[in-house]
Amino acid sequence: MRETDFVSGFARGLMVIEAFGEAQPRLSIAEAAKITGLDRATVRRSLLTLSELGYADYDGKFFALTPKMLRLGHAYLSATPLPAIVQPYLDQLSEKAGQSASVSVLDGTEVVYVARASQRRVMSINLMPGSRLPAYCASMGRVLLAALPEVEARAILDRTELKANTPRTKTDPEELMEELRRVRAQGYAVIDQELELGLCSIAVPLMSTRGQVVAALNIGAPAAHVAAAELAQRYLPLLRETQAALRPLVQ
Amino acid sequence: MRETDFVSGFARGLMVIEAFGEAQPRLSIAEAAKITGLDRATVRRSLLTLSELGYADYDGKFFALTPKMLRLGHAYLSATPLPAIVQPYLDQLSEKAGQSASVSVLDGTEVVYVARASQRRVMSINLMPGSRLPAYCASMGRVLLAALPEVEARAILDRTELKANTPRTKTDPEELMEELRRVRAQGYAVIDQELELGLCSIAVPLMSTRGQVVAALNIGAPAAHVAAAELAQRYLPLLRETQAALRPLVQ
DNA sequence: TTGATTATGTGCGATATACGAACAAATGTC
DNA sequence: GACATTTGTTCGTATATCGCACATAATCAA
């Protein structure tokens, strides 16, 4: 790609959108400039553009994103066949298991939920399509990392902030790489309260007809309800069944 | 706002993103140019920019959005306190009612789901945060339109394509305005299979402490399970309860 | 109030981008 | 295979945008 095939004004605008988030629901021009590292004048133009187009509200001081912003993510969700294909299977799986079931894909160091069928909420965090979790400590993340060539998985771990969310969280890169090998060999990953105390989950990869891993499928359960050691025995047959049913439908 | 405070390259890029959708999951440069009405050279630069930034994949012929695109919608969802606040109440409501419950806001002529607790799927369409339905034939849409000044509600109806999704869909603007008055007076809206045959729903407004309507809350049920006429009797108390509980928490 | 500090708005020269057209490549048609 | 059509790419130039420097406005502490 040539230098001139890149619209930097567009790229800068996208950076400005991503500056908003949980900690920054409302941003002034100067704050957004600080977060993005862009010039204030540039950020101001981007924010005014967003406001003019209805993607943001402006009260003269602060900017806040509007629901119109969801059109952009929705453009992906509705354009991608995967969520629609897996949803009915997810609903069925969730009902049979009596637990929440989800499908996610990898984006950088994080897993992104693209579909979910939830039972009673067990986590403090509310997961929905678009939600993100660090890959290294999530069952679907382990499965997706295990599907990559080792060097790539290692590269992702190296640029992840490996923090211990709970006393059980594995944070040593070597130990994690070893775990990925185990996951690759056995074809599934089990997480025992590494993300949040009281929460276990088990995940398997979803493969395309050509055998490529395109996503991960999991079941999450409260640790009080199901011991991590029992997860495989209890849910692996259901997961395998769903995995097999989806295989010819993906890609 | 001055002319020069608008970054047209950014605005054009956003148009290109929105060109993707259910019917257009993969776009060539020429297709995207046709949909957006922009010059092919311009669209090409935007798409290559998206691809360079990892928001799109490019196989040399077609572009497709990547999961990274969900970061943009997620910037809104995580930046807005509403979804997180309402979710636990929604879960509770959904469980008590044994039906799906949702919260949405208005964006132009459509309602946008910002939170949802789903039970067994009853609709052909899969709703999730970010999903959109035409306001005129959805229960939450009726409630949100009823909360607007009549001229504004009328203006929205006038620029909506009022199509009959089912034989029961109300499509006459006058009749709809009359219905909005009824909704405003009674404080809730009931939809009887106007969006999809076999599906009924009932919605109430969610008000801020200052009495402003900021969102709508609904319960959807299969018509076979609950007759539309029974909806209010059966679910209105639960909805009112949730509405009251949320009122001090919103805004 | 004052003055210090921080945030926002604006004019301008340098640079980047859009447009239309021309060209090249691919695709479809007869 | 030749022709017509569509699509992708490149180029020159008019126009738009960037980032800087400065001007103005808001905020706050003493």
Image (cartoon, coloured by chain):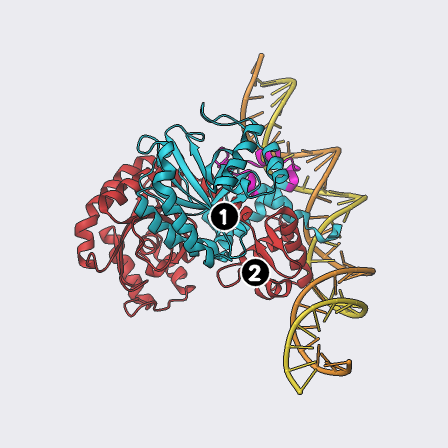
Chain colours: A red, B cyan, C orange, D yellow
Towards the viewer: B59 or B2 = B2
Start-end of magenta stretch: B17-42
Crowding at mark 1 (Cα within 10 Å: few <14, some 14-19, many 20+): many
Towards the viewer: A31 or A168 = A31
Could you tell me if residue B111 is visible in this image?
yes
Give the residue pinned by disc 1.
Answer: B215
What percent of the width, then of the height, locates residue A77?
A: 45, 42
Please, which chain is the residue tagged with disc 1 on?
B
Residue at x 56%, y 60% (from the top left corner): A26
Three-letter code for the amino acid on which mark 1 is drawn: Ala
Q: Are marks 1 and 2 on the same chain?
A: no
* Residue B19 counted in the magenta span: yes
Secondary structure under tag 1 reads: strand
What percent of the width, then of the height, locates residue B142?
A: 50, 38
* Residue B218 counted in the magenta span: no
Mark identifier at residue A26: 2
Q: Nearer the viewer, mark 1 or mark 2?
A: 1
Work out how far the residue at label 1 is from the one at label 2, CA to CA, in angstroms: 19 Å
Three-letter code for the amino acid on which mark 2 is drawn: Arg
What percent of the width, then of the height, locates residue C28?
A: 54, 22
